[in-house]
Amino acid sequence: MLPKKRKNADLEKKKSLFFEIGLAIALLMVLIAFKWRVPINETETIVSPQELTDVEEIVPITRQEPERPREKPPVKIRLQDVITIVENDSKEIPNLEIEDEEITQETEVEIRPTEVSYDTEVVDEAEIFVVVEEMPIFRPDICKNMTEGNIELNRHIQKSIRYPVIAQENGITGRVFVRFVVGRSGKVKNIEILRGVDPSLDQEAIRVIKNLPAFQPGKQRGVPVQVTYSTAINFVLQ
């Protein structure tokens, strides 16, 4: 049996009407809310105002303690050798023989040369100097001073370099800083790389320095000593 429904009872047709009515009611409530006034109670005047007094700020009292004197470290008393003067109590009279000789122009006087001994400074053979009075000179047979020796040293190094094949293929260049010691005999020893570029270039630099001819050794107060020497080898592909 089908349910019977009247067309006048169908509310779907009045859906838009209900929506408009609801929207109008909402707008009306918003307008009322904006125009709604809340009563404000007026403030009562104070008949007997309380007298306000300035409150003094309480400053805390601080007392600065006097600085304590710094205690000085105890003075160490170092005992030194005391020289005591002892009077000679011996009553012996020294035998002094005074010979009176007549000296004339014809008298021959024998003059003996006095021997002067110089104390030579003992230099530690194991000590290595950085700067000495006479610096080492490379190729002393053709160089007179250290400046000429450095020029000849750079020339000799450039002639002795064999550029490693691996470095050539990879295009490796750079400057290798080397430090070594010129011994008391003038031979080179204790070679070390201060700043390298590549292992192949570093090994070549060590080989060149190791095969250097002997230097004129450095001297300190005329005594040959060991002196530190440093140089830079520039590897450039041509």
Image (spheres, grey):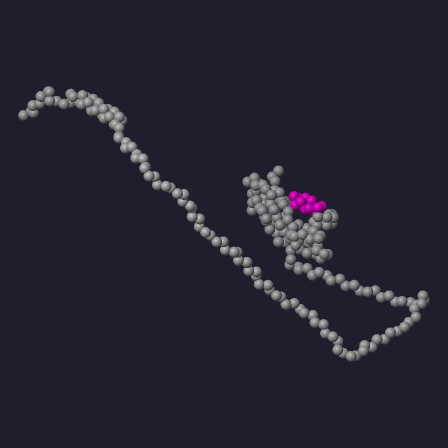
Residue 25, picture quadrant: top left
Quadrant including the C terminus: top right
52 vs 94, nearest the viewer: 52
Residue in front for this viewpoint, 49 or 227: 49
For the record, the magenta segment spans: 147-159
Viewed as shown, does residue 144 lie left or right of 8? right
Point out the residue furthest to the left here.
1
Magenta stretch: helix, strand or loop mostly: helix
Which residue of the protein is positioned furthest toward the front in this rendering?
48
Percent across and percent down for residue 52 are 38, 41
Q: For the point 69% across and 61% down, which residue is it? A: 122
Whether residue 131 is visible here, answered yes or no, is yes
- The total number of labels drawn is 0
Expressed as whole percent of the image width and height from the top left, the position of residue 27 reads 24, 24
**Residue toward you, 21 or 228:** 21
Residue 211, given in percent of the width and then of the height, sits at 65, 50
Viewed as shown, does residue 174 lie left or right of 121? left
Residue drawn where x is 7% and y is 25% of the image: 3
Q: Which of 47 and 201 is in front in this view?
A: 47
The answer to which image quadrant residue 157 occupies is: top right
What's the residue at 65%, 43% (across, down)? Answer: 158
Q: Is residue 40 above or below residue 172?
A: above
Quadrant occupied by the N terminus:
top left
Q: Is residue 188 visible?
A: no
